[in-house]
Amino acid sequence: MDDISERFWCKVAIAAEDECWHWKAAASQGYGRFGLPSRRIVPAHHVSFYLRHRRWPKYLLHTCDTPSCVNPSHLNEGDQASNNKDMVRKGRRRIGSLQHKYAHAVPRIRDLLKHGCRVMEIARWLDVPHPVVSNVKNGIHAFKFLETAEDQYRGNAHAAQAA
Ligand SMILES: [Zn+2]
């Protein structure tokens, strides 16, 4: 497997030890992908771990929360429990960013509601998921609901494209 080392590191923007080393080649959902000689495709950060520790990790977490990072110092081998905790934490962050994403629309939603516009119309005009508009209308600020709204919105968008 030593022959992969050179092929691997030439795809990495190696930086200082405490900085993120970004993967420059093929990626999927932000995570670098690397083809092994066996033709198996593996996450690039797993290869980074392997090259340092000479064994494959079962779970591998980024301490820097940067999916494209393959700096071995930013990788922590976790277990099922810490992996789940990490997923929960990332989920919370995603919901936080969703709130932020639609926060700018809230004053306009309120304004349009005051003028008697309908939820579906407002959603279409402002290009926001209609459950977000309903939430504002009902005064609900449920984080979890926003996440569901985003997923439904994406689902609807796909359905609309397919139609
Ligand atoms: Zn990093």
Image (cartoon, rainbow, N blue to C red):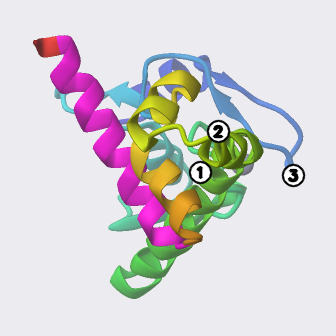
Residue wearing tag 3: 18
Under mark 2, the amino acid is Leu
Query: Spatial distance from mark 1 to mark 3, Cα to Cα?
Result: 29 Å
Displayed quadrant of residue 129: top left
* Depth order, front residue of 24/148: 148
Residue at the far left in the pictured view: 163
Report whether 117 appears left or right of 154.
Answer: right
Residue wearing tag 2: 112
Query: Which residue is found at the position 20% from the left and 19% from the top?
Result: 160
Under mark 3, the amino acid is Asp
- The location of residue 50, given as percent across then percent down, is 45, 51
Q: Which mark is residue 129?
A: none
Question: Is the residue 76 above or below the residue 146 in the image?
Answer: below
Under mark 1, the amino acid is Leu
Q: Residues within 10 Å of mark 2 (few under 14, many from 20)?
A: some
Residue wearing tag 1: 98
Question: Is the residue 53 above or below the residue 44 in the image?
Answer: below
* Depth order, front residue of 44/150: 150
Element under disc 2: helix
Q: Residues within 10 Å of mark 1 (few under 14, many from 20)?
A: some
Displayed quadrant of residue 143: bottom right
Displayed quadrant of residue 59: bottom left
The magenta stretch is 142-161
Which corner quadrant holds the C terminus? top left
Residue 156 belongs to magenta span:
yes
Question: Is the residue 10 above or below the residue 103 in the image?
Answer: above
- The location of residue 61, given as percent across then percent down, is 53, 64
Of marks 1 and 2, which one's residue comes earlier in the chain?
1
The residue mark sitting in front, 1 or 3, is: 1
* Depth order, front residue of 66/41: 66
Residue 30 in view of the camera: no
